[in-house]
Amino acid sequence: MLRFKIILLLLFFFYGFAVSQENQPVPEKKTEKVYTPEEIKQLEEDYRLALQMYRRGSYYTALNVLSKLVRDRNNPFYGKALFLMAKIYLHLGRKTGLKEFIQKAMYYLNTYSYSVENPFDWEFYYTKGNIYENLYMYERALAMYKKAFSMADTPKKQFKTVVAILRVAAWLKRMDIITRYIILVNLSELSEKEKKEFEFVKGLVEFEKGNYKEAIKYLIPVYKTYEEYLIENPDYYLIVGENAYRLGDYSFAKKIFKRIISIVKDESVIRKALLRLGDIALKEGDKILAMNYYYEVVKKYPDTDEAVIAKLKLIALGKRDRDIQIRLLTSEDKDFKDPLGFILKALVLNRNNYVGFFALADFGFMVLGSKSEKLFDKLVHELSLVNISRMKYEHIEYIRELWEPELYRLNYMRVCKLFSSNEKFFYTVFDRKMLEHFYSNLKKCGKLKMAFDIANFLYNKWKDDRAVLLLADAYYSLEKYKKSVEILKKIKNKNCQYYILLSKNYIFLKKADISLIDRIKNRCKKESVEKRVVISYLFLENGQVEKAFKTVEPVTDKLPDYYTKTVIGKMFIRKIVYLLFEKELYQQALKILIPLSERLKKDCDINSWVLVAAVRTDMEKLIEKYRQRIQQCNTEWSLIAKNIYEDYQVIRGLKNE
């Protein structure tokens, strides 16, 4: 019964719902607007007017006209209006540097693509590639340009596409693509303007390859005869100035950067030009002018990446110049009052991006001159995170400028710790001289494999005598003496270093050649401990002990350093002491040993040798002093010395009786 009632209720509910639906009014279909011939003619005139304004450069007037044409999707000129709006916004974005214009261009182009039939032609892909290029999305731009190239059905379209591909390939440093496409350009088919545009692209390619002297051959003619092209593309104008800057032609670079500031509308390009003017002033020694340029960026464009970079440059400048530091502290900007805090914040927020590398440079500059282990460990950590593929010329230049003086003063253990944190960073940033400095420091802290890698890197890059010597020295340090001698055969100019290293290798190979002594004397005019030790060692290997002693006698006060820092130094001292003892030349042995023992008071063998020599020469004061020093020693030589001392005491006792 209950089930029957429920069924009746459900039937009643569905019946009522159906009746109510039937009584609802049926909505009228929205009718599409049908344009009369007169209206279509008016729309066509409006579109042509917008196109005319676009070609004249009256972009905002054109946009105003086009905004009326895109209100109705059924408008027969709707698609064309969308596409033209995309091109106008692209042009405005390129000229002003405002990315919101570029993004609007992308919006209108995408809207166009699903509003018309068959939109995907050459012009669509070329325009989309141009939009991606101006958003710095070069890989995507390249893909679009390649599609456009496949659809280019006229020589003009092909040229424009090839130039675009070459341009993007240059930004990406894809020389393989450049080689493949550059041969497709037929200069005889180009107009004068197209030839100049192609000249600029060739200059850009050379610039990106780092061939600045070659790049200037193409860039200067474009600057002189086709400046409007550079004004329309401000990033390209910046390349002309940057190329001159990297060549060290600061006078011409200043002229270009000032010209950019006066006529270009793209504020991002203006900011970069101001920063470079500050850099030039600094290189020319005018710190106040440099400060003014940097500070102008901070004040005029406060919420930009360039303002952060300018502050970082000002902080570094202030650290090197007390007067500038005082001026910065008196400013209202709180970041100058807490520079380390500002640097760390900029570093953490911008790690591995364009701004972040400038912050890393400042942080390193602050820390390398500091004694704080905590900050130093933080720097090591930050270096370990660096992605060198994202670093640009200006980052490398700035880091090198700030860090090099500090690195030369840095303790070798810290140098080793830094280098070990990110080897690729140091190979990328620093020049040959600094890498050689790292090499010598890595040897000191026992990182011989890393030191060898530096020597091998420099050899593969330079292959000159200087690089050969370093590689031979690296093999010598790894105890690969035969390989070291083999590498030395490649030396063309056999200088002092060559003969010293060759002699050291022969000593370890038990092939000491007495004829090398005269060659070392002839080539090594400058006095050094190593020179005398090596010559002395060669005398020892040939049984001429007294000559060996006379050779090394003038530098006995310098032997302790050489002994503690080199393997051959330790071997030499042991050998000459043995041979002097063998010939009972104890006074001579003491002349060598006493300076060493004063430096190395806990060295059991050295102090034992002094005790032996002192006993043999009956020097009572020395005997008692060195007996006490070796009292706790238990080496073979200390036991010998103690026995000799005991015999000495017995003999003395007998004599006294």
Image (spheres, helix red, strand yellow):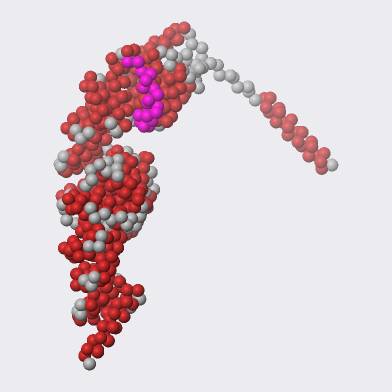
Queried whether the magenta region covers residue 17, the answer comes back as: no
Quadrant where the C terminus is found in the figure: bottom left
Q: Position of residue 241 (x, y in %)?
A: 24, 31
Q: For the view shown, which residue lies furthest in the bottom direction?
A: 657
**Magenta stretch, overall SS:** helix
User: In the image shown, does 552 or 188 lie closer to the viewer?
Assistant: 552
Queried whether the magenta region covers residue 179, the answer comes back as: yes
Residue at image position (47%, 7%) is 37
* Number of numbered discs visible in the structure rendering: 0
Q: Position of residue 438 (x, y in %)?
A: 29, 51
Quadrant where the N terminus is found in the figure: top right
Q: For the view shown, which residue lies furthest in the top direction?
A: 37
Q: Position of residue 394 (x, y in %)?
A: 28, 39
Q: Position of residue 258 (x, y in %)?
A: 20, 31
Is 612 left or right of 173, judged from the image as shown? left
Answer yes or no: is residue 53 visible. no
Is 246 left or right of 51, judged from the image as shown? left
Snapshot quadrant of residue 548: bottom left
Residue at image position (25%, 76%) is 611
Q: Is residue 631 above or below residue 34?
A: below
User: In the image shown, does 401 or 18 lie closer to the viewer?
Assistant: 401
User: In the image shown, does 261 or 372 lie closer to the viewer?
Assistant: 372
What residue range appears in magenta? 169-187
Residue at image position (26%, 76%) is 612
Q: Is residue 186 above or below residue 238?
A: above
Snapshot quadrant of residue 140: top left
Answer yes or no: is residue 496 visible. yes
Residue at image position (79%, 36%) is 8
